[in-house]
Image (tube, grey):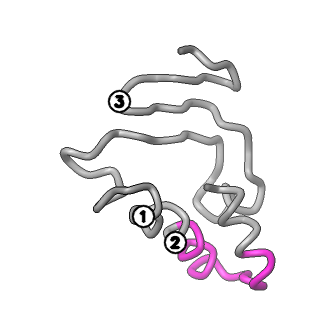
Amino acid sequence: MLRVAHQFARLSGLRHDDKLLAAVELATKGGAHFVGRDVHDLVAGSRADIVLVDAENVSDALIRCPPRKLVISGGRIVARDGDVLV
């Protein structure tokens, strides 16, 4: 979803940190409906899906789209440094 947010921000001409953050939130939290969930966020009781990247902040992650360091799905580590573990 980071690449989707990146393309959206680029095509929309978003340049300021608050607008870049909004693009990421739209592609993550805002995408709950599209993945069949009421909530798509890191909160108690959620599925525990997360992708970790090496970035200074959200804007840096969006602009650079660094490789995924760790992918957790359903609370289980499923990929690390580009290697699928399941």
Rendered position, 70 above or below 84:
below
User: Callout 2, which amino acid?
Assistant: Leu
Tell me which residue sits at (73%, 38%) in the image: 67
Residue span colored magenta = 9-24
Q: Can residue 14 be found in the magenta stretch?
A: yes
SS for dot 3: loop
User: Callout 1, which amino acid?
Assistant: Lys
Q: Could you say which quadrant of the image residue 80 lies in? A: top right
- Give the label on residue 29, or none: 1
SS for dot 2: helix
Rendered position, 7 above or below 16:
above
User: Callout 3, which amino acid?
Assistant: Gly
Tell me which residue sits at (44%, 69%) in the image: 30
Tell me which residue sits at (59%, 73%) in the image: 23
Spot occupied by residue 34 in the image (x, y as percentages of width and height): 46, 62
SS for dot 1: helix
- Give the label on residue 26, or none: 2
Circle 3 is placed at which residue position?
A: 75
Viewer-side residue, 20 vs 56: 20
Q: Can residue 13 be found in the magenta stretch?
A: yes
